[in-house]
Amino acid sequence: NAGVTQTPKFRILKIGQSMTLQCTQDMNHNYMYWYRQDPGMGLKLIYYSVGAGITDKGEVPNGYNVSRSTTEDFPLRLELAAPSQTSVYFCASSRQGSSPLHFGNGTRLTVT
Amino acid sequence: QKEVEQDPGPLSVPEGAIVSLNCTYSNSAFQYFMWYRQYSRKGPELLMYTYSSGNKEDGRFTAQVDKSSKYISLFIRDSQPSDSATYLCAMSGEGNNNDMRFGAGTRLTVKP
């Protein structure tokens, strides 16, 4: 089982560029999440989804968008990259809303 | 004041030592408490999952929750070099992952 797979692993963006961080899971989990992890800070929830076609904002959604057209995929879109979005982004999934989280290995994004 | 406080360390111990990792929190609504282990350049993985106050043991790992003091701990017995990682505490109110809050993580090194 691959679990949660994130691509790309690394990316450097210029200010104002756009990109999509990909996330796919093969565990048939309904719940999926996007977090960002900054030094000295805990993981912060950006967006989450409770199933295909249903998404909702987390703690820090500004500057990001998501979609969930299938159970497996949950891409995160950055429209106009800003230096404040330099971070490590983790996708996670869970079987139910209270089940333990399964994380991918992250995408390291630098915006310059 | 952060909702979850965790000493970032770094913490360095010799192999075989007992390690104590701690978090404090301010939100009395938290009822579900977790510890995640995160190796360098990897995503967090669940170590322990507990509900309300009390102790839970799993092999060399023991999690303790003291809700009256808003204090949680993770003990690692007979620590091994393979335990070298960052340990994140996490907690949620009704067991919904979308309201989970994470500590910033404690970096642990176990020296052979």
Image (cartoon, coloured by chain):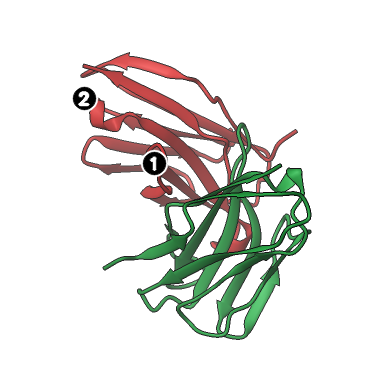
Chain colours: A green, B red
Check disc 1 and report its element: helix, strand or loop. strand
Choose between A13 and B79: the one closer to the eye: A13
Residue B24 picture location, percent across and down? 59, 33
Determine whether A79 is above or below B108 in the image: below
Locate the N terminus of chain A by quadrant: bottom left
Q: Residue at x 24, y 25 (%)?
A: B81
Chain letter for mark 2:
B
Q: Where does label 2 land, which residue? A: B78
**Left or right for B91, reference A41:** left
Choose between B62 and A77: the one closer to the eye: A77
User: Looking at numbered disc 2 in the image, what kind of residue is underneath it?
Assistant: Asp
Chain letter for mark 1:
B
**Left or right for B12, reference B82:** right
Checking the image for residue B37, the label placed there is: 1
Q: Residue at x 28, y 42 (%)?
A: B57
Choose between A71 and B92: the one closer to the eye: A71
